[in-house]
């Protein structure tokens, strides 16, 4: 019987997840469908009430439901810390859930710049939904994390939730010399947006620069970092690796993230 998993969101039409999962279903010969489930916020409660009868093994969850869906599932420790989820699976007759963005980010660092494991101090720019997952994962990995956000209050809220310390947006240039890892989680550098305007000269030579923006793949920030000979990590890695968590929960093994998959996802951008 064809197994069913899907993506719950509103809207969901532009998601790259169907491309990612189709690649793995073909690669591993799995008879399964990854379905788009557009559900309006007002209909979320009814969706979860009916979910058991719908015949799904699991779900990914995207905007605007990542926080509100957490009320309908049993959260793992990461989901509880973040108060936000993106992956739901069945376990012992219950619906369990986590947020896989942080694990995806760490896997992407491991893949593209393994030297990050020597880092002690991270400087994270931005304090939105993606940033909190990134910060939580870095703190859990033992790093000291400083978070700078244009609107300082959001950085304060973030560190109140997961730890680390908030630093003023204006202090970023002065903090670069002690940053072993610099991460952009803002939307600056994304297609159609302003670039992130920071002079990377003060970064140490061993610094790793990561961007979670994946469109374009080589953001102005990553281009400057590469030109300076620094190790770089692009945003496509996090996008793909976060999906491996759901696949493993639903189908029992961690799928490979290979060059062919990266090419397929890049072709959709
Ligand atoms: P996501 O959930 O993807 O992180 P988000 O919650 O909209 O998206 O967060 C976007 C991030 O980009 C925020 O940190 C935002 O800063 P503010 O909280 O101050 O809005 C940041 N950002 C967007 N445009 C920016 C700009 N022009 N300058 C600095 N930061 C910007």
Image (cartoon, helix red, strand yellow):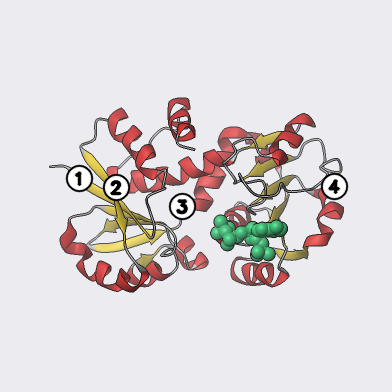
Q: Is residue 107 left or right of residue 164?
A: left
x and y, in percent, of residue 77 in the image: 46, 63
Q: In which quarter of the image is the N terminus?
A: top left
x and y, in percent, of residue 5 in the image: 27, 49
Asked if the residues shown at circle 1 and circle 2 are in contact, with their CB atoms under 8 angstroms apart, the answer is: yes
Question: Mark 4: is the Cβ under 8 angstroms from ligand 1?
Answer: no
- How far is the residue under mark 1 from the one under mark 3? 22 Å
In terms of secondary structure, where does tag 1 sit?
strand
x and y, in percent, of residue 147 in the image: 71, 60
From the image, tell me which residue sits under label 2.
250
x and y, in percent, of residue 42 in the image: 33, 73
197 to 207, vertically: above or below:
below
Is disc 4 surrounded by few (<14), some (14 to 19) or many (20+) residues within 10 Å?
Answer: some
Q: Earlier in the sequence, mark 1 or mark 2?
A: 1
Is disc 2 surrounded by few (<14), some (14 to 19) or many (20+) residues within 10 Å?
Answer: many
246 to 54, vertically: above or below:
above
In terms of secondary structure, where does tag 2 sit?
helix
Q: In this view, does 186 lie to the left or right of 237?
A: right
Q: In which quarter of the image is residue 44?
A: bottom left
Taking the spot 53% from the left edge, 52% from the top edge, the residue there is 102
- How far is the residue under mark 1 from the one under mark 2? 10 Å
Taking the spot 48% from the left edge, 26% from the top edge, the residue there is 259
In terms of secondary structure, where does tag 4 sit?
helix
From the image, tell me which residue sits under label 4.
177
In terms of secondary structure, where does tag 3 sit?
loop
From the image, tell me which residue sits under label 3.
100
Q: Earlier in the sequence, mark 3 or mark 4?
A: 3
Taking the spot 22% from the left edge, 54% from the top edge, the residue there is 56
Is disc 1 surrounded by few (<14), some (14 to 19) or many (20+) residues within 10 Å?
Answer: some
Q: Which residue lies furthest to the top in this view?
A: 260
Check residue 3 in the rendering and tell me which mark sits there, or answer none.
1
- Residue 149 in view, yes or no: yes
């Amino acid at each position: 019987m064809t197994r069913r998993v899907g993506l719950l969101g509103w809207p969901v039409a532009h998601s790259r997840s169907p491309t990612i999962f189709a690649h793995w279903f073909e690669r591993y010969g799995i008879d399964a469908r990854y379905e788009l489930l557009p559900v309006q916020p007002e209909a979320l409660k009814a969706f979860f009430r009916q979910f058991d009868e719908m015949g799904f093994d699991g779900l990914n969850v995207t905007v605007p439901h990542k926080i509100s869906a957490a009320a309908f599932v049993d959260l793992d420790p990461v989901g509880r810390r973040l108060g936000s989820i993106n992956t739901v699976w069945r376990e012992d007759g219950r619906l369990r859930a986590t947020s896989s963005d942080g694990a995806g980010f760490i896997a992407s660092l491991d893949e593209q710049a393994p030297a990050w494991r020597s880092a002690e101090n991270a400087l994270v720019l931005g304090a939105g939904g993606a940033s909190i997952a990134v910060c939580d994962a870095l703190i859990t990995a033992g790093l000291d994390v400083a978070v700078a956000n244009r609107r300082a209050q959001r950085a304060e809220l973030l560190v109140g939730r997961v730890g680390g310390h908030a630093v003023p947006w204006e202090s970023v240039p002065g903090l670069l010399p002690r940053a072993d890892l610099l991460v952009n989680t803002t939307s600056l550098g994304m297609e159609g947006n302003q670039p992130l305007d920071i002079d990377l000269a003060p970064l140490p030579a061993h610094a790793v620069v990561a961007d979670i923006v994946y469109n374009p793949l080589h953001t102005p920030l990553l281009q400057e970092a590469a030109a300076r000979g620094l190790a770089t990590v692009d945003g496509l890695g996090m996008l793909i690796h976060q999906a491996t968590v759901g696949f493993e929960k639903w189908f029992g093994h961690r799928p490979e993230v290979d060059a062919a998959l990266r090419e397929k996802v890049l072709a959709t951008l």
